[in-house]
Image (spheres, rainbow, N blue to C red):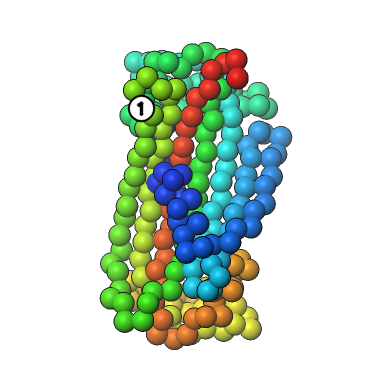
Amino acid sequence: MKHPMTSTPVLVLALLLSAGVTQAAHAQAPSSGVKTEERAGVNPQGTAAAKVTISAVTATVEAIDLATRMVTLVRPDGKSFVVQAGEEVRNLAQVKVGDKVTVEYYEGLVAEIAPPGSAPDKVKVTEAMGRAAPGERPAGAVGEAISATVVIEYVDTLRNVVHFKGPLGKTRIVKVMKPEFRTMLKNLKPGDQVKLTYFEAVAVSVKPASN
């Protein structure tokens, strides 16, 4: 379904689990039916860390317009909302009133220390899309990852503060909050290059009304 964000869950999980990252998770499901889970980790060498927040809600199809691809959904708390199923959601004609639709939204960050002597990467945007095969239950995912290399200028491991210069030459000062990234911070020194990848993704799947 259309969403301003992009990257497939496969890409998200690959980024999170790359370099042997060890995970920590926390989940919460408020009365609205939206379940939020946070996963974070750092690899054994302390050279790569990742964090991803996953928000998911399972809603019931109340109405569907195949001509406009507009679908009205009802959350578990009874509130309805309208979404437009993009082309990435294949087999939309199979969706019926009463079907359950699960929408998952992923957002996260991966940081990895580049090997010494590496050439800095330019800002790169990677888009990805996944669709169900023809004849399968409707499903789709769409996402985007933005990568850039920054140069470390100063590291304070006592206050967990780092200064770094971005691709445009501007220096930023960041207070590192997540324990996993603080572990990585201990291995940084001025002059190191760190590749940062920010990603967002939406995945949609449909189950028959009887499920």
Residue at x 46% of width, y 60% of height: 18
Measured from the top left, where is residue 187 in percent x and y? 52, 80
Q: Is residue 27 above or below residue 122?
A: above
Q: Nearest the camera: 188 or 76?
A: 188
Q: Nearest the camera: 70 or 42?
A: 42
The tally of labels here is: 1
Q: Nearest the camera: 74 or 121?
A: 121
In terms of secondary structure, where does tag 1 sit?
loop
Outermost residue to the right? 31
Residue at x 49% of width, y 68% of height: 48
Measured from the top left, where is residue 84 in percent x and y? 41, 27
The kind of residue tagged 1 is Ala
Residue at numbered disc 1: 133
Instruction: State which quarter of the image contains the C terminus.
Output: top right
Can see residue 62? no
Judged left or right of residue 15, residue 167 is left
- Label 1: few (<14), some or many (≥20) within 10 Å? few
Q: Is residue 205 above or below residue 22?
A: above
Judged left or right of residue 30, residue 207 is left
Residue at x 32% of width, y 71% of height: 167
